[in-house]
Image (cartoon, helix red, strand yellow):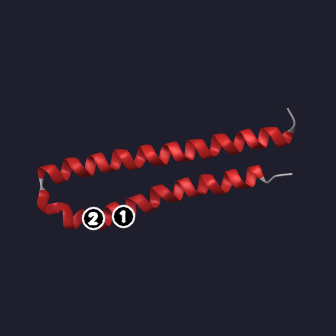
Amino acid sequence: MDNLGAAYIGAAICMGLAALSGAFSIGLMMSKVFDSVARQPEIMDKIRPLIFIGIAFIEAVALYGLVISIILATKR
């Protein structure tokens, strides 16, 4: 296998792991949010901004994976 093929495989693995970890993390975070809101419904207004901040940080990691995979895929 040449270096270009290895770069394509590395890009695919990088993007796959970044997407998988982002989806798993958001799912885990939202399950904890739903559990806490089910116990105390009045807390929803207080944790809503924290939810959006958490989602933004998690998606940033997935976007970093996308950037790295694009760099690897366009390597010559």
For label 2, the residue is 48
For label 1, the residue is 52
Residue 17: quadrant of the picture: top right
Above/below status of 4 relative to 53: above
- Quadrant of the snapshot with the N terminus: top right
For the point 84% across and 43% down, the residue is 4
- Total labels: the figure holds 2
> Dot 1 lies on which element?
helix
Q: In this image, 42 relative to 12: left or right?
A: left
Above/below status of 45 relative to 13: below
Above/below status of 28 relative to 59: above
Mark 1 in CB contact with mark 2 (< 8 angstroms):
yes
For the point 28% across and 46% down, the residue is 31
For the point 53% across and 47% down, the residue is 19
Q: Residue 57: x percent and y percent?
A: 46, 60
Q: Residue 13: x percent and y percent?
A: 64, 40
As shown in the figure, which amino acid type bears the numbered disc 1? Phe
Q: Residues within 10 Å of mark 1 (few under 14, many from 20)?
A: few
As shown in the figure, which amino acid type bears the numbered disc 2? Arg
Q: In this image, 37 relative to 73: left or right?
A: left
For the point 44% across and 62% down, the residue is 56
Q: CA distance from mark 1 to mark 2?
A: 7 Å
Q: Residue 49: x percent and y percent?
A: 31, 67
